[in-house]
Amino acid sequence: MQTKSLKQTIYQDSDVHFEVEDLGVWAFLHCEVQHWSPSVFKRSIRVFAQFLNEAAQKGYEKIVTISPNPKFCKVFGGTFESAFTQNGITYEVIKWELK
């Protein structure tokens, strides 16, 4: 039996990959950066801003992600929700409120 993946790629190039996982009125954001540079940062900001607009239009109320690098998420406008430590690494749950 095959199950439908809830993850959908919203943007991918050789430097960065954004995926979103549909959780009803929430979405969980996955982001992997292969190569970081100022141009990748600018492109990522544009892609993410477009994603937030489209997510709000689709009825999402909140976007969340878990990151060991919360400064990166906060530069994208995310705010702190909570934190936890796993295997000696501290992660933060970052959110974007859309409504």
Image (cartoon, rainbow, N blue to C red):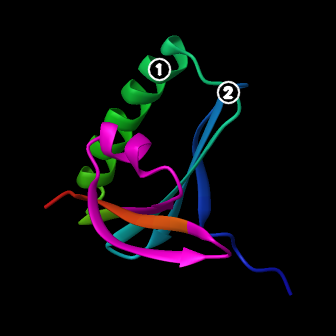
Q: Position of residue 45 (x, y in %)?
A: 38, 28
Which quadrant would residue 12 be assigned to in this image?
Answer: top right
Q: Position of residue 41 (x, y in %)?
A: 47, 23
User: Does dot 1 land on a helix, a strand or a loop?
Assistant: helix
Inspect this view and state whether residue 60 appears: no
For the residues labelled 1 and 2, the Cα–Cα distance comes to: 10 Å
Quarter that holds the N terminus: bottom right
Q: Are marks 1 and 2 in contact (CB under 8 Å)?
A: yes
Q: Residues within 10 Å of mark 1 (few under 14, many from 20)?
A: few
Q: Residue furthest right?
A: 1
Reading the image, the residue beneath label 2 is: 13
Q: Amino acid at mark 2?
A: Asp
**Mark on residue 89?**
none
72, above or below 36, in the image: below
17, above or below 35, in the image: below
User: Does dot 2 land on a helix, a strand or a loop?
Assistant: loop
Is 1 in the magenta? no
Reading the image, the residue beneath label 1 is: 43
Residue for point 39% across, 76% down: 24
Between 65 and 3, the residue placed more toward the observer is 65
99, above or below 25, in the image: above
Between 18 and 2, the residue placed more toward the observer is 18
User: What segment carries the magenta color?
Assistant: 64-89
Q: Amino acid at mark 1?
A: Arg
Is 71 in the magenta? yes
52, above or below 92, in the image: above
Which quadrant would residue 40 be assigned to in this image?
Answer: top right
Between 37 and 5, the residue placed more toward the observer is 37
Quarter that holds the C terminus: bottom left
Q: Is residue 2 left or right of residue 52?
A: right
Q: Residue furthest left?
A: 99
Residue for point 53% across, 57% down: 68
